Image (cartoon, rainbow, N blue to C red):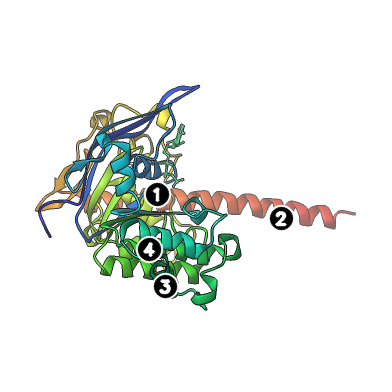
Amino acid sequence: MPDQPLLDVTDLRVSFRTRRGRVTAVDGLSFSVAPGEVLGVVGESGSGKSVSMLAVLRLLTNPNVTVSGEVLFRGRDLLSLPDKQMRAIRGREIAMVFQDPMTALTPVYTVGWQIAEQIRAHEPVSRKEAHARAVELLSDVGIPDAASRVNAYPHEFSGGMRQRAVIAMALACSPALLIADEPTTALDVTIQAQILDLMRELNARGSAVVLITHDMGVVSEIADRVLVMYGGRVAEEGPRQAVFHVPRHPYTWGLLDSVPRVGGTRLRRLPTIAGVPVSPDSLPEGCAFAPRCRLRHERCDERPELSAAPGTPAHRDACRLPADDRTSLRLTARAAATGAAAAEHAGRASKAERADKADVEREAAP
Ligand SMILES: Nc1ncnc2c1ncn2[C@@H]1O[C@H](COP(=O)(O)OP(=O)(O)OP(=O)(O)O)[C@@H](O)[C@H]1O
């Protein structure tokens, strides 16, 4: 892997001024993306995934937002680049795909016109040539009858087709980096698989991809590296195999244990992560996950630094548990979570049984 990262984010902080005071959505986030790699970004809702990527792209334009840190893209700091240069980078060197494809498409122009304009924005080709390329790209992303659909308006496309059209626009400029934020969440599973295939294709053509998703299954299929976020901070990061097979942070354990496994051990109830995600207006001084962690101890009151797993410098986590004993600690945490889930299930079951019995008795009463 080349030494120079494509994207190198250091100590990114994003806060919003709100009526409740200042809330910190991203709290000292550092990560990098190498050329051509796929980084999967995971974490529960509210962990700061979208806000951090919007900050990287300088798309947080609300005057109540404060962004600081360093975002080096090919060595240039995006946070201090003039607007014009930033606009040139967005869409040409960095493409974006969001959950709602209508954020990227304009309703009043045909899909083909928009793709052709994207091509013409960075290639000296005629309108006619750009139009022909747009047809080709729509066909490449699996739009049937592309030669006539190229003249359709976005509202004449289904949700899946619109998302493919957005990816066609990304393909049009062969970006060095694609940032995709929940690109398949609104789509049904077969279309999801096709969109993921297209992202793989883009990656095979050399683009690096940052994929934000709730779906650990998708990450396990497509990512080279995984970044686990919690409370606007990195909880764990590392090569996919390492994060999935020897996860180190109790939060990652919780995320992985709450994924149903086809053909896996059947538990009556899947363990969930106890408690609710930390709110950005009350981030603790110490470990953000500590209030929900079954293994928390006094040292968790101090903020943990990211540190490498013994012998694997690329696999890092921010946790103050003993570094070399995580497997047995994970088993302890899982037993506690599974026991609590089973107890909760038994409690609910016996409550339901008592209610059933009462119903039967009532019906049987004269
Ligand atoms: N404009 C805003 N003003 C105040 N707080 C905000 C604003 N936008 C986002 N936040 C807060 O920032 C935190 C991070 O939000 P973000 O959307 O990045 O989470 P996420 O991990 O992407 O979640 P999801 O998976 O649900 O999209 C959340 O607590 C959110 O409420």
CA distance for labels 4 and 2: 41 Å
Packing grade of label 3 (10 A; few <14, some 14-19, many >=20) is some
Q: Earlier in the sequence, mark 1 or mark 4?
A: 4
Which residue corresponds to mark 1? 337
Q: Quadrant of the C terminus?
A: bottom right
Three-letter code for the amino acid on which mark 1 is drawn = Ala
Farthest residue in the bottom direction? 145
Three-letter code for the amino acid on which mark 4 is drawn = Val
Labelled pair 4, 2 in contact (Cβ < 8 Å): no
Q: Is mark 3 within 8 Å of ligand 1?
A: no
SS class, disc 1 = helix
The circle on residue 91 is: none
Residue shown at the point (43%, 62%) measured from the top left: 115
Mark yes or no: residue 350 visible. yes
Q: Pick the residue in front: 361 or 278.
A: 278
Which residue corresponds to mark 3? 132
Which residue corresponds to mark 4? 218
Q: Nearer the viewer, mark 4 or mark 3?
A: 3
Q: Quadrant of the N terminus?
A: bottom left
Farthest residue in the right direction? 366
Residue 146 at x, y percent in the picture: 49, 75
SS class, disc 2 = helix
The circle on residue 356 is: 2
Q: Pick the residue in front: 27 or 52.
A: 52
